Structure formats: structure tokens, C-alpha cells
């Protein structure tokens, strides 16, 4: 490994939905992947759906759970179930979602919790949509794009319509898309963390329907980060490695319609299951390890390969049976 690179371990989880990890002493612990003791990591990434409804007592419980994970940096985004963190949605649907617990001040209190003393003491940094850069004690530095939004899903929080593009600039959007971007994904990004998956990238529902975002896929092809992590579609838990075509930069801005992009976007990309030692990662009951460092089993080439991870913890029945992912990446060291 070059002296300018630092091996950095990421623990990736999503869709914990206020579930506590199963105790190691539980007689049924072998049936669950989300259990104590947690592995240590340099960086924890939680890709949203922290709760079921975004209630304040749920957030308090999640912060307590995350405080038990040993990681120098813990980065958290919201998901569609974290209703009170989406102010616009909560104004419209908060009373329906929270019932007797409804309070119009809940969104501000929720933000204050995630940016307040308890979260900071737990090492948590709550990210709203945008691009950030972090430097670890090791000197490893990385850029990350975060977004809690996903295509409209059963009238839950952080929605956008399927024809709306919030990840590219107007010049980069598909011809029949409506561009609504306020924070498009920038080039030369290391990690992209979204709640929802990209189109045909661990996005299939239980009946085989791909529901991921084609605009996000286009942005990922354009930027080609080392890692894209998400959740949202519980049953699509898994990890794959994409080797982008040589002309990815040009293809990602080709002028075409959404239907044309869905048909051809990944045509020349090579997609293989990540080397985890499991035929189906959903059956793993211990943290799933992927070594993407040199000389690891699956090294990534910057701007050529992307590891795609759907790290949902609960299954369709909201049982915390899936295991976290542990991913080793090589990051640039700060001079």
C-alpha cells in the first residue's frame, strides 16, 4: 500500500427501524445478523430509516444504540420512515403519522437531538443532503455525498417523483426528466450514501420489480465513487462490484430519454457479486467483510470500480436478521 494511502474500515448499516441489536446471550442469537458485540470500525455509515415513524423517543433510543458502536466517526442520514426530519412532509402528514403524539415543534426538536449534545457525545454527525469532507486521526481523508431522498414510496417522507432528477445538473439530466437538483453529486467523490438504491443496483422488491432511481444511477456512472451505500429495499440486501465501461463519463451525459437510459445505462458495465464468502449475504449471521484494499481480495480502482452495498438490517417483516457490512477502503492521506 502506498504511504499516501490509509486503509480505513467502514461499518455500513441501514433500516434498523429502532431495533436494538440482539444480545449475544440470547438463545436465539444465531438466527440474527444484527447482534452484539458490534465490530469496531473507523467510520460508521447509517443509510437511514433509523426509526418507524420519526418519534422523538424513537430517536432517543437510536442515539443510545449508536453510542455503543466503537467508531471514530459515525455518519447518519434520515430515511423515508424518519418523518419528522422532513419538515415539508411533516407539515402535510405529521398529524396522520404521529397521532396523539403530534406536535408541530417536533421537526425542530428532532434536528436539535441529532445535532445536539447526546449525539455529539456518541460521536454522531447527522448529515443533510450535500457534500462533506472528513479527516480521521490516521490522516485518512474522504469526501462523501449524502441524501435521504428516494423516489416517492407509499407517501412517506423525503420523496421525489420518478421523473425528477435531484442528483445531476440540468445539463446532465435525461431529456424528459425534470431537474430539481439543489445539491447534485459532484465529480471526484469517494463515497455516496443515499437512503434509496440506484436503478438495478440492489433495488428489487420481493416480486422482482426494480424500483431504484435511474437518475442516481446516471450520477454514479458520471462520478464513479469507490463506494455507494444505501438501504430502503430490505429484501435487496447485498453487495456488488461494478466495473464501469471505458466511456462511462461520456455515456453518463448522453442525451437520451429515461426509457432509453433504463434499457442501455448498464449495458456495457460489468456487475459481479462482491467477494464476501457467502453465496447469499442475506443468510450471513456475522458481519460481512469485503476487503477492497491492496492487496485485498477485491481492490477497487479509483474512478473505474464502485462497490454497491444495500445494508438494510431488517427484512420484510422488520426482523433484524441481516448483518452489517464491514468494508476496507484505501483513502488518501492528508499531507
Image (cartoon, helix red, strand yellow):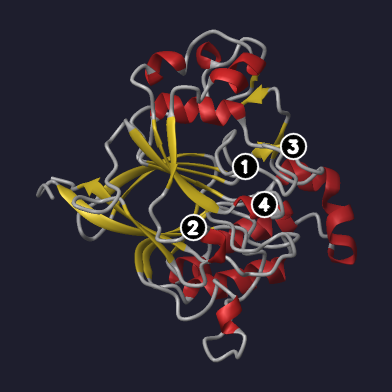
Q: Is residue 335 above or below residue 84?
A: above
- Front tag of 3 and 2: 2
Disc 4 and disc 2 in contact, CB within 8 angstroms: no
From the viewer's perspective, is 311 left or right of 139? right
> Mark 1 highlights which residue?
203
| Residue 55 locus on image (x, y percent) | 74, 64
| Residue 54 locus on image (x, y percent) | 72, 60
> Mark 2 highlights which residue?
279
Q: What is the distance, in whole Å, between disc 1 and disc 3 at their CAs?
A: 14 Å
Q: What is the distance, in whole Å, between disc 4 and disc 1 at their CAs?
A: 24 Å
Q: Nearer the viewer, residue 56 or 169?
A: 169
Q: Is residue 182 visible?
A: no
> Mark 3 highlights which residue?
152
Category of crowding for the residue at label 2, using alpha-carbon neighbours closer than 10 angstroms: few (below 14), some (14–19), many (at least 20): few
Q: Disc 4 on helix, strand or loop?
A: helix
Q: What is the distance, in whole Å, between disc 4 and disc 2 at their CAs?
A: 37 Å
> Mark 4 highlights which residue?
85
Q: Nearer the viewer, residue 88 or 145?
A: 145
Q: What is the distance, in whole Å, between disc 1 and disc 2 at their CAs?
A: 18 Å
Q: Disc 1 on helix, strand or loop?
A: loop
Q: In the displayed image of the protein, which residue is found farthest to the front?
A: 279
| Residue 235 locus on image (x, y percent) | 65, 54
Sequence-earlier tag: 3 or 2: 3
Amino acid at each position: 500500500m502506498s504511504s499516501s494511502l490509509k486503509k480505513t474500515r467502514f461499518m455500513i448499516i441501514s433500516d434498523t427501524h429502532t431495533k436494538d441489536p440482539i444480545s449475544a446471550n440470547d438463545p436465539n442469537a444465531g438466527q440474527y445478523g444484527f447482534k452484539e458485540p458490534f465490530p469496531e470500525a473507523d467510520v460508521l455509515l447509517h443509510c437511514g430509516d433509523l426509526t418507524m415513524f420519526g418519534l422523538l423517543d424513537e430517536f432517543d433510543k437510536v442515539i443510545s444504540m449508536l453510542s455503543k458502536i466503537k467508531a471514530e466517526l459515525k455518519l447518519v442520514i434520515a430515511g423515508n420512515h424518519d418523518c419528522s426530519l422532513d419538515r415539508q412532509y411533516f407539515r402535510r402528514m405529521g398529524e396522520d403519522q404521529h397521532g396523539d403524539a403530534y406536535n408541530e415543534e417536533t421537526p425542530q426538536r428532532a434536528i436539535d437531538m441529532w445535532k445536539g449534545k447526546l449525539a455529539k457525545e456518541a460521536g454522531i454527525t447527522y448529515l443533510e443532503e450535500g457534500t462533506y469532507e472528513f479527516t480521521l486521526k490516521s490522516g485518512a481523508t474522504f469526501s462523501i455525498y449524502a441524501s435521504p431522498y428516494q423516489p416517492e414510496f407509499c407517501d412517506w417522507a423525503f420523496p421525489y417523483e420518478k421523473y425528477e432528477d435531484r442528483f445531476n445538473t440540468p445539463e446532465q439530466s435525461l431529456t424528459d426528466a425534470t431537474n430539481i437538483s439543489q445539491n447534485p453529486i459532484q465529480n471526484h467523490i469517494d463515497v455516496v450514501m443515499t437512503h434509496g438504491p440506484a436503478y438495478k443496483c440492489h433495488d428489487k422488491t420481493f416480486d422482482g420489480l426494480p424500483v431504484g432511481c435511474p437518475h442516481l444511477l446516471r450520477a454514479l456512472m458520471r462520478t464513479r465513487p469507490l463506494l455507494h451505500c444505501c438501504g430502503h429495499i430490505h429484501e435487496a440486501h447485498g453487495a456488488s462490484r461494478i466495473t464501469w465501461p471505458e466511456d462511462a463519463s461520456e455515456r453518463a451525459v448522453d442525451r437520451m430519454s429515461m426509457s432509453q437510459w433504463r434499457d442501455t445505462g448498464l449495458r456495457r458495465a460489468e456487475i459481479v457479486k462482491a467477494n464476501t464468502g457467502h453465496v447469499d449475504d442475506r443468510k450471513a449471521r456475522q458481519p460481512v467483510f469485503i476487503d477492497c484494499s491492496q492487496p485485498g481480495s477485491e481492490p477497487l480502482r479509483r474512478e473505474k470500480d464502485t462497490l454497491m452495498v444495500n445494508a438494510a438490517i431488517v427484512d420484510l417483516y422488520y426482523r433484524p436478521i441481516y448483518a452489517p457490512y464491514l468494508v476496507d477502503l484505501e483513502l488518501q492521506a492528508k499531507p
